[in-house]
Image (cartoon, rainbow, N blue to C red):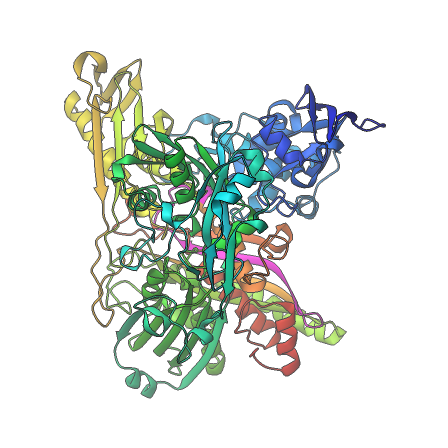
Amino acid sequence: MNATGPTIAGSGTAELQFTLNGKQQRLTLDPSRRLADILRSELDCLDVKIGCNAGDCGACTVLLDGKAVCACITACGRIDGGVLETAHGLTRRDPDGIKLAAAFHRHGAAQCGICTPGMIATATALLRPRTELTETAVADGLGGVLCRCTGYRKIIDAVLDAQDGSAWPTHNDHKPAGHAGEAIQRLDGFAKVMGGEMFGDDVAPQNSLVVKVIRSPFAHAGFSFGDLAAYRKKHPGIALILTSADIPGKNCFGVIAPFADQPVFAEDFVRFRGEAVAAVVGDAATIAGLDTDDFPVNWQERPALAGMPAALQAGAVQIQPGRAGNVMCEGFVARGQLEDGYAGSDVIVEAEFSTGFIEHAYIEPEAGYARKVGNRLEIYASTQSPYMDRDSMAAIMGLKPEQIRIVPTACGGGFGSKLDLSMQPFVGLAAWILQKPVRIAYSRTESMQSTTKRHPSAISIKMGASKDGRIKVLDFCGDFDTGAYASWGPTVANRVPVHASGPYYIANYRARSRAIHTHCPPSGAFRGFGVPQSAVAQESVLDDVAEKLGIDRLEIRRINALKNHQPTVTGQIFTKGVGIKQCLDALISPWERALTEAKRLNAEAIAAGSPIRRGVGVASAWYGCGNTSLPNPSTIRAGIREDGKVVLHQGAVDIGQGSNTVIAQIFATAMGIRVTDLQIIGADTDLSPDAGKTSASRQTYVTGNAARLTGENLRRQILRLGNVSERAVIQFEDGAIHLLDHGLERRIILADELPVNRHGYVLEAEETYDPPTRPLDANGQGDPYAVYGYAAHMVELDVDTALGTVKLLRFHAAHDVGKAINPMLIEGQVEGGIAQGIGLALMEEYLPGRTENLHDYLIPTFGDVPEIRTLIIQVEDGHGPYGAKGLGEHVLIPTAPAVLNAIKHATGIRIRHLPATPSKIMAALRQGGPDE
């Protein structure tokens, strides 16, 4: 470093000289500016990602003189005379960085990829001293970088592999066909590990105008504007101020049309803290320096209904018109007679449970840009649902859907929240009016204030069983706080009663649910749509029933496990594909070992006076793939160009789960070609058909089936064209199709023999798949899902009864996926879902106004996620592509109840109100019973 500091070049500026990724640089600027801002805006280092601007997430980590620093909290004056390295440079120039990129790709350690550059930079600094790294050392060394997707385990494996492993080439160099069942690496993984993935804040043109949204500081308030013209005149760089009066179409959006109720800009009063009332558009410098505290809006704070008890009180203010008592909607499933079930029960257990708001905490805040092109509006954004965005924006803008183009960028995590519109209306409206590109990137606080959360729940449950362990009756009642607006509240209310039974045969059943409005942020989709909350109650009570009956907790689940030909609680009967018993059976051996070990360790601890107690817990889960009793189609198109290239229009947005790879594998299998023969065109409403939203664990099953049908169609066309049998091998070479059929060889010169269609293809296929379901009747009887996935989790943990702390030791996760299309990606989904379940169980609770950053809101880090053993069970389904079922949401569902059941096993206390923090555990231990 320069011993005398940066050279002062003028008022507030300094000349800085430094090396960046091996090249000498010289800049004159304000030395107090954030290094991350300089790297991105002045030096085009878009591999440096901004997740928090507070040093909490580590996504922006770079190496400064060999040491890892958070660029977002480093003043750029510190780099004078120094050496800077970013992931982009490290993975191309540095031997350790190159090895890490190869290892990350090899292990599937990058899912969405937003944290990967920070991980690789930090890991490079760990490798360079050449000291032997252990798993603990890697976890400690990378602990400052957060990941919400992977569960950290594959990252640790990759770093340890890079320590001793090779760089490129990797194990994929034998060029597998990539068909269903092969654990190939992500087809889009190279850009992720090399720092080249482009997210929402990376794609806007230089000199785009910038939007800043004015939001309410109150949960409930009236408001009026002052002199907006005077405010704009005071700030000459402002190009436009937007309010509800500027919306040309409907000032309303929502993901479920009959319940759409959320305004782009509030009118007259706001219903939650963080709600938008206006937006200011201007040049980047003006917006960056804008103090919105003096924005001319006058607030009149009103009493707020901060939770469901207040919202349900008689006489409470009605938050939404037409929704009396603040009940937005209800769900109901009933089968058999509760009275018969109670009469046949030898043991009855009833209890109440609750969970709070959970923040999605994806590392990429909402970001994107918009531009007007002719008479059309284009929006580039991080989203899970491009066609839904298109249709919503058309209504807001008063345009036809075909006048809107949505181009999804890479999505740095979504988990459900990026299904809803967020920043799209602000940039779209501004770009349309100003006819200039307009960009936005939410701050972490803005993201956490204004976007959807997991629904808080208040659940009462009553279960009865006979002495042989068979569940005779279950009565479930759950209220879910949907916040100020509907979002996905109707889906939660309807999905929960179907799933609250768990994957068990129960003849006498009733489940009721309600979505309740409060003056809180909207609750939306979050990996499970309310099912994780219901499983906490149902699986905990099942454990307590087993205890009262003196039956082994795993065994009672095996006794009641749903089987083929047995009706579910909605009366649906599956003749094949019900795999919960196989999942539970896979846990028998580790379960018996763990119980024996726990008994011994606890006896030794008591004898030694140690406060540590070992616990073992288990829980089951099932989850229906796709929409509940509603149409749920996906469409896939593919074509062959005259140069022989096979192009797959793959519109299923990949948010890290791997649809870009899995859908391509299914298509290649169906067509009988190698996955490397494909060129993939991703989600874009102008280029790819509607593959539906990425939610409800539907893409592998629904879009996968559309891909299978499309591949089979295209294969049939080729075979018919070549007049060969179904057994023929298809190969592409030099603009021709080569067909080999048991000694017969046929060569089709595409440019000579076939005309080009309007899409530019000489052969084309497009197919749609919509799952066969049947609507639920008044009692919730019907076929809500064509496919369910099944799971059983077992956890081993220690509880320190002197401190109330929980140390997780090991998970065994058995998942019936039908057909494992890509086992490596399955492992990644399992590990990532378990990490989020750990957060739900032990630490996460969003408190509006208090936990609006990643410092106060805690998510699991490297040290919180233990060893995870994934047990892939394949009970093929009759509907899924090659028997495959969805997976993404299933993983989170049994994790939290398994942890709670293990805490009960270790200590004898039942935690019923999540999260199970040390203070709650200690309070329960002191009172000698369940927390209340």
Total number of numbered labels?
A: 0
**Is residue 819 magenta-colored?**
yes
The answer to whether residue 297 of the structure is visible from this angle is yes
Instruction: Determine whether 758 is above or below 797 in the image.
Output: above
Which residue is located at x 78 percent, y 27 percent?
6
Task: Find residue 721 and report its horizontal and vertical position in percent.
Answer: 15, 22
Which residue is located at x 48 percent, y 46 percent?
228
Name which quarter of the figure residue 643 lies in: top left
**For this rendering, which residue is in front, 490 or 350?**
490
**Is residue 722 magenta-colored?**
no
**For this rendering, which residue is in front, 790 or 22?**
22
Which residue is located at x 34 percent, y 34 percent?
377
* Quadrant of the image containing the N terminus: top right
View extreme (bottom): residue = 343
With 8 as the anchor, is 242 left or right in this view? left
Instruction: Determine whether 52 is above or below 21 in the image.
Output: below
View extreme (right): residue = 3
Task: Find residue 452 and report its horizontal and vertical position in percent.
Answer: 45, 55
* Quadrant of the image containing the C terminus: bottom right
Task: Find residue 407 and report its horizontal and vertical position in percent.
Answer: 37, 35
Name which quarter of the figure residue 59 lies in: top right
Task: Find residue 81 and report its horizontal and vertical position in percent.
Answer: 77, 25
Where are the magenta residues, as a range?
A: 800-825
**For this rendering, which residue is in front, 862 or 26?**
26
The answer to whether residue 407 of the structure is visible from this angle is no
